[in-house]
Amino acid sequence: MRSLKATLCELCVLSLAAFVLGAATNAVRATGSLKWNHRYFETEDLSSTQAGHDPSEEAPGAAKESPFKHPYQEATIDDVFDIAADPDSDRGLYVLIDARSADVYSEGHIAGAIRCYHYEIDDCIDSTLETALGAEKVIVYCNGGDCEDSKYMCRELIDRGVPYEAVYLYAGGWKEWIDHEMQFVTGDE
Amino acid sequence: MAASKSIIRRIDETGIALLVLRFVLGILFVWMGWNKVVDPVGFLKQIHLYDLLPESPGIFLNATAIVLPWVEIVCGVALLLGVLLRGASSTLATMLLVFTPAILLRALGMMAETGTPFFELSFDCGCGAGEVVTWTKLLENTALFLATILIFASSSRRFCLALWLERRKPVSDYCGRCGYRMPASSTPICESSGCTGGFRSTLAEAHELVRGADVT
């Protein structure tokens, strides 16, 4: 009994130490800090439901190339190419959003894409919304394949007022873009 | 049975086996925990893939991603130093008991989905070691689990910081005659039913006496 009590005390000490260290590092880290209560994996699209769209129904115009389920309209590589090839002509009407982290974005991204990482949303959402709210079409991409960051980014945009009809998910993502040997740019902008 | 028990006990008493296990597990868990600390978002995504915790509210997944890596590091350091050994080993054993079947289930799911043979499956299990071959990971985790059990069961405290700290106590909690842990009280006389005339002494003396104790 005594031994069990001692073990439980040790468990408490270790857990408390881990909690304090975890909370402290999360609070002070410059990048990758997580919010304790944020729902990073919210998939129920409340806004689109309010707009009359049933998330369980197939989205209009969806090619459904994505390996994961999502309720958003899909954009094809041709849609993205049209925007990337001549972003000036429709500046403000069409917006490309890269939903990947800063280091990956710097290594290469589609020309004209603005970066907004779902897990560091506070750093970028205001500036992203400034552009996205007035846009006719907002296409979001991430790595492609089974990367779901673009899906969660779409939800964040819709929850913050971007109309469901304007949001598109480019399921092929960066991987498909590179596989097709499309042009890209590097750096932070 | 008695002979084998004696051999196991003698090996344990040397403290060497415990020391080796402590160092191997300690270094491994500190390294794996640190790999998770430097990429909390990556770890969060991995935890989410296991479907062990609800997505909503977010506190469950997020708290696990923030705290669990430090649990590994803290327990790893405890093993390396030789303190709180029972607590550290039981914590790590519990984690292995939860995550190893989870890895197996995820592997079986991928096998069903992709048709890849089990022994050719590999994926990033979120353990901090990157993409690993599944069956070797499962074997490794099983071995680690057994190692944590051995550490938990060990009675030795040789080469442990805990023993060094205990020796520095001016008054020990242990009877110098029979090694029995004496209740916290002012009386210096051991009240163990198997001991007469015992008295408080340092833990080191108690250990020495217990080895050849003639408890009456």
Image: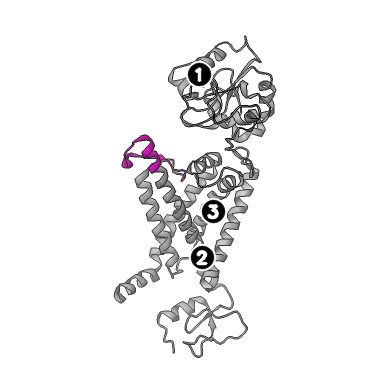
Seen from the viewer's position, the closer of residues B180 and A86 is A86
Give the secondary structure at mark 1: loop
What distance separates the C-alpha of mark 2 from that of mark 3?
Answer: 20 Å
Residue of label 1: A76
Give the number of the disc on residue B161. Answer: 2
Asked if labels 2 and 3 share a chain, the reply is: yes
User: Crowdedness of circle 1 by 10 Å Cα count: few (<14), some, many (20+)?
Assistant: some
Is residue A73 shown in magenta? no
Q: Residue at x 42, y 68 (%)?
A: B154
Seen from the viewer's position, the closer of residues A101 and B26 is A101
What distance separates the C-alpha of mark 3 from that of mark 1?
Answer: 44 Å
Give the secondary structure at mark 2: helix
Counting from the top left corner in percent of width and height, residue A169 is at 55, 24
Q: Quadrant of the C terminus of chain B?
A: bottom left
Residue of label 3: B71
Q: Are marks 3 and 1 in contact (CB under 8 Å)?
A: no
**Residue type, mark 2 in image:** Leu
Quadrant of the rendered image containing residue B74? bottom right
Q: Are marks 1 and 2 in contact (CB under 8 Å)?
A: no
Counting from the top left corner in percent of width and height, residue B138 is at 37, 49
Counting from the top left corner in percent of width and height, residue A2 is at 53, 73
Magenta span of residues: B107-128
Give the number of the disc on residue A4. Answer: none
**Residue type, mark 1 in image:** Thr
**Residue type, mark 3 in image:** Val
The first of marks 2 and 3 along the sequence is 3
Q: Chain of mark 2?
A: B
Asked if labels 3 and 1 share a chain, the reply is: no
Residue A52 in view, yes or no:
yes
Q: Is residue A14 above or below residue B125?
A: below
